[in-house]
Image: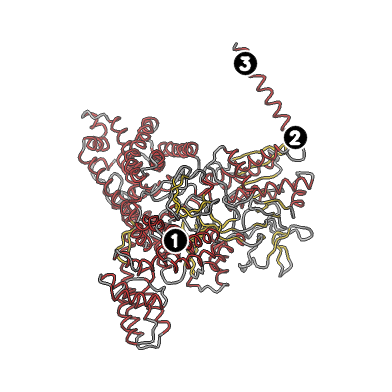
């Protein structure tokens, strides 16, 4: 009896490893570089699952170039230098055809030298501060002109906001975004004393004085709004304090760039109703592609309560673009894919088509949503057409003259139209 | 906050709504139907017109509908296109049709769609509800309504307020109406009226009054009344400065009480027992997660859940603490470096365990209604009620702990063991048992802190890390082994932080406080209240 069992087991193991061998021989490997432990696990774990789902679906459709796709998942553990090591491991050891990953800008900056040295392809799915265009990175999240500026326009034109609080966590994304917004607001005729800028440390939890300052700043007769680049965890105490001090969304609306459905699922949404967020996708968007995506997600994750969010859509778009580019190029070789992907258009989840631009950013619609008490957003405004991501902001003195165009003959990420020179630096 | 006051008073009227609508006349019914259909079909920008028309036609009805929309309780049935009041949009819940008061059970949630509004409409509705509230029965409501329309009036409204003022009998309401009129008449051409208005406004603490005065100074800077107005502005500004100081002190005390709560468990484990417990933050986290679990277990009694969570968190975190002490720490007594590394490892294990059990996402812990709200002292100073509870809770925990240490047998044995272990054992104290219980006590108190923190901040796997540094800071600054030291240190650090914040910014304030503590420890290594006696010498 025992022998029999043992034999069965042994054959099973042999069969599995044999099939693994067969698979390994003709699969295309896809690297997934998202933190599964540490502080960023809260946001990045979902993106890892999204990638596994997209790869599984593609395999069901017959794979790519007649081969099955094989995900290679590594855990950089929210540790920025480890991102670079893991990226090197994925490219050199596992020989992945593309990497989908990173969340924070610092993790992206950390892998940049590696992917440029080894000439790979990376898809980055999160909204970021811009001021970068690498030959090897494709930015499927929003650039500031695809999120921050339309949101400010909405507040100014629709709600008549005249005084502005720019509140952010103290790191590169809020600092750059606020610099752009400050320049933009001053260009639009907002006086310097009507702009209040405030930075707080990561994970700031005591918002009493700042909220009280905002309240006083808003009590001077002009309509006031808060533009928040406050990062993940610090948002809950911030909104709780707003509620506690009796500031409602009708008094002083807050528009946030880092609060999505996923973050809301961990918050008591009571005090948040009516506050705003600007994204390129909301789970509540009514479109067939979105319904299908949500159904697939629920089936894959086996939990009907899980939400979808904007970076997930970015991965959906990025993955489909990569698939289409590989099919167009007929190979997964990085240089061929980099050429082929420019101009590729794939459906996004809001019912339109997104295209990869020569500056490695994509075109997307911009939606403004109001938070509802069920943790979803109600779209209150959307741009008429698609907005093309701008790698170099037009509102910063250093970057206004720069453009990125990775098509031949320019092939440059930071071409200065004034001096006619490409600075040569790749980011 | 104004609006909350207003709505609290007006809430009874929603209850009467069905009654009112059920008795509308035949002619009114046709009108209601027309408005109803228009509202259901409307986009955001049309809704404003529709509701304004409705307000003109039937003010009471329109105001009640606005209130329903503000409370997100106004729905329509997608097929029959009629308005319903739905308090709970779930399958099986009851929806009440507005036109005839008929109750319908919701068979499918998707059949009902909320009549959505945006911030523009919200602000507008509040204005109109306030206008209607000027004639409310409750004086408090009339005052709230007056404050809401202040600085936001038109000649018609001024005429209405003037009429109402003539009939008004309540002195406080009269004052509020006076203020509304003063803000409006400040812009009139009549010098005498202006002078009277400036005098009225100068006595008020309303932000609208100050803004009106400032605007007056800008437009009529040449007027003879300008000195009078600027005097009034100065007087108000002086009061603002004073109340800002009071507010900062309150903020500091409440931040301090959070620091004390987070640190006081550590004052026992580190201060009394000398164990460098890096997993202290995670014990706080376990307490917060216990609150979450309790709320999941009793979803219909959120108000009570916190009271249940306090003992539950104490027990859960305490047991985890005892387990830690018996399983790991007792083998490492006298070896601080190993203890530090081992407990740091444990903190990582506990974090990842929570990630695996509850998912890496934050969990939402609801704030019970009795904790929310503001205590309005005057228009310039209102204190948040939740913080008030936290300060009181912190003091309560502190006093209890002090009583346990000073008055109970356990406390006596704990102090005996910490002062001279061998002597205590010779006197028949089971020192191992005391060690386990002391560590359990410190851990349990950390759990209680977790319950309080769940009301202020995130409940997630990383929450403990945010408090570990602060906790050590408070205990070391206060003097190791001294509960009073912990209290004084926590509160004074909180106040110092809040005093620095306005002019240094949140980031720099924190750095300055840290630098101060480093320098202080250089000068007085034993903290604010050093322990004296033989035990402290070795």
Front one among A427 and A280: A280
Which quadrant: the N terminus of chain A? top right
- The residue located at (67%, 25%) in the rendering is A16
Dot 2 and dot 3 within a common chain: yes
Real-space Cα separation, disc 2 to disc 3, in angstroms: 31 Å
Q: What secondary structure is found at the residue carrying circle 3? A: helix
Q: Which residue is mark 1?
A: B26
Chain bearing mark 1: B
Please state which of the two labelled residues, at mark 2 or mark 1, is closer to the viewer.
1
Give the quarter of the image for residue B25: bottom left
Count of number-bearing discs? 3
The answer to whether A113 is drawn above or below residue B381 in the figure is: above
Q: Which residue is mark 3?
A: A6
Left or right, residue B451 beside residue A156 = left
Q: Position of residue B428 (x, y in %)?
A: 22, 28
Q: Which residue is mark 2?
A: A26
Colour treatment of the image: secondary structure
Front one among A391 and A354: A354
Q: What secondary structure is found at the residue carrying circle 2? A: loop
Q: Position of residue B494 (x, y in %)?
A: 34, 56
Residue farthest front in this picture: B26
Front one among A166 and B232: B232
Q: Residues within 10 Å of mark 3 (few under 14, many from 20)?
A: few
Dot 3 and dot 1 within a common chain: no
Real-space Cα separation, disc 2 to disc 1, in angstroms: 78 Å
């Amino acid at each position: 009896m025992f022998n029999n069992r043992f034999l069965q087991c042994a054959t099973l193991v042999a069969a599995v490893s044999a099939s693994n061998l067969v698979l390994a021989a003709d699969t295309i490997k896809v690297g997934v570089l998202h933190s599964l432990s540490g502080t960023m696990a809260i946001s990045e774990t979902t993106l890892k699952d999204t990638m596994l789902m997209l790869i599984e679906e593609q395999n069901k459709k017959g794979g790519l170039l007649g081969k099955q796709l094989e995900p290679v998942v590594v855990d950089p553990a929210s540790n920025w230098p480890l991102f670079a090591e893991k990226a090197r491991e994925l490219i050199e050891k596992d020989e992945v055809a593309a990497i989908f990953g990173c969340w924070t800008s610092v993790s992206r900056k950390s892998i940049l030298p590696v992917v440029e040295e080894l000439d790979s392809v990376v898809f980055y799915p999160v909204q970021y501060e811009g001021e970068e265009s690498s030959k090897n990175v494709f930015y499927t999240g929003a650039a500031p002109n695809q999120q921050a500026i339309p949101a400010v326009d909405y507040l100014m034109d629709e709600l008549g906001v005249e005084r502005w609080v720019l509140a952010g966590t103290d790191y590169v994304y809020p600092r750059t975004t606020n610099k752009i917004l400050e320049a933009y607001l001053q260009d639009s005729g907002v006086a310097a004393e009507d702009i209040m800028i405030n930075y707080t440390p990561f994970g700031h939890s005591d918002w009493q004085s700042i909220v009280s300052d905002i309240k006083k700043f808003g009590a001077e007769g002009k309509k006031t709004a808060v533009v928040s680049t406050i990062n993940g965890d610090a948002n809950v105490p911030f909104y709780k304090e707003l509620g506690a001090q009796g500031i409602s969304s009708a008094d002083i609306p807050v528009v946030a760039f880092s609060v999505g459905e996923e973050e809301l699922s961990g918050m008591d949404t009571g005090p948040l109703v009516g506050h705003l967020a600007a994204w390129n996708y909301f789970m509540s968007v009514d479109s067939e592609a979105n319904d299908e995506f949500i159904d697939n997600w629920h089936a894959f994750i086996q939990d009907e309560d899980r939400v979808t969010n904007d970076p997930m859509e970015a991965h959906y778009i990025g993955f489909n673009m990569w698939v289409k580019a590989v099919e167009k190029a007929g190979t997964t070789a990085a240089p061929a894919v980099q050429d082929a992907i420019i101009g590729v258009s794939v459906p996004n989840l809001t019912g339109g088509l997104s295209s990869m631009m020569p500056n490695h950013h994509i075109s997307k619609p911009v939606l403004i949503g109001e938070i509802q008490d069920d943790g979803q957003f109600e779209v209150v405004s959307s741009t008429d057409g698609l907005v093309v991501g701008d790698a170099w902001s037009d509102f910063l003195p250093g970057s206004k003259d720069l453009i990125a165009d990775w098509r031949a003959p320019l092939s440059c990420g930071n071409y200065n139209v004034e001096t006619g020179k490409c600075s040569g630096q790749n980011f | 906050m104004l609006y909350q006051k207003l709505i609290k008073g007006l809430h009874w009227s929603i209850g009467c709504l069905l009654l009112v609508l059920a008795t509308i006349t035949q002619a009114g019914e046709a009108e209601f139907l027309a408005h109803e259909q228009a509202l259901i079909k409307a986009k955001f920008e049309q809704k404003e017109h529709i509701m304004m028309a409705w307000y003109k036609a039937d003010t009471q009805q329109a105001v009640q509908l606005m209130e329903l929309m503000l409370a997100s309780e106004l729905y329509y049935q997608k097929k029959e296109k009629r308005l319903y009041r739905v308090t709970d949009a779930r399958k099986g819940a009851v929806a009440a049709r507005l036109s005839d008061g008929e109750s319908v059970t919701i068979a499918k949630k998707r059949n009902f769609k909320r009549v959505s509004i945006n911030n523009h409409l919200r602000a507008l509705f509040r204005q109109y509800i306030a206008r209607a509230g000027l004639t409310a029965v409750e004086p408090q409501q009339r005052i709230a309504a007056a404050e809401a329309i202040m600085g936001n009036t038109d000649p018609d409204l001024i005429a209405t307020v003037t009429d109402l003022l003539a009939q008004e009998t309540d002195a406080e309401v009269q004052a509020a109406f006076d203020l509304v009129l003063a803000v409006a008449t400040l812009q009139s051409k009549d010098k005498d009226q202006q002078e009277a208005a400036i005098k009225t406004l100068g006595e008020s603490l309303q932000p609208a009054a100050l803004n009106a005065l400032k605007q007056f100074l800008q437009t009529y800077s040449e007027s003879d009344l300008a000195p009078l107005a600027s005097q009034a502005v100065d007087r108000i500004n002086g009061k603002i400065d004073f109340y800002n100081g009071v507010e900062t002190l309150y903020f500091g005390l409440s931040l301090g009480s959070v620091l004390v709560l987070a640190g006081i468990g550590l004052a026992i484990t580190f201060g009394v027992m000398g164990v460098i417990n890096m997993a202290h933050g995670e014990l706080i986290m376990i307490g917060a997660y216990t609150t979450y679990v309790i709320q999941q277990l009793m979803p219909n009694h959120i108000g009570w859940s916190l009271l249940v969570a306090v003992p539950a968190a104490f027990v859960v975190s305490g047991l985890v603490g005892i387990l830690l002490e018996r399983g790991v720490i007792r083998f490492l007594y006298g070896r601080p470096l190993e203890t530090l590394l081992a407990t740091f490892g444990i903190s990582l294990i506990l974090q990842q365990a929570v990630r695996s059990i509850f998912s890496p996402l934050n969990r939402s812990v609801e704030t019970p209604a009795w904790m929310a709200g503001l205590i309005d002292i005057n228009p310039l100073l209102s204190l948040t009620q939740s913080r008030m509870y936290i300060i009181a809770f912190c003091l309560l925990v502190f006093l209890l702990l002090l009583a346990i240490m000073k008055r109970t047998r356990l406390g006596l044995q704990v102090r005996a063991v910490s002062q001279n272990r061998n002597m205590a054992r010779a006197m028949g104290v089971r020192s191992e048992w005391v060690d386990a219980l002391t560590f359990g006590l410190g851990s349990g108190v950390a759990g209680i802190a977790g319950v309080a923190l769940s009301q202020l901040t995130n409940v997630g796997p990383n929450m403990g890390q945010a408090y570990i540094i602060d906790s050590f800071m408070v205990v070391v600054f206060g003097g190791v082994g001294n509960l009073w030291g912990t209290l004084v240190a926590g509160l004074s650090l909180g106040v110092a932080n809040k005093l620095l914040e306005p002019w240094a910014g949140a980031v720099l304030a924190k750095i300055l406080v840290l630098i101060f503590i480093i320098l202080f420890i250089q000068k007085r290594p034993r903290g604010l209240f050093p322990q004296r006696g033989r035990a402290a010498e070795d």
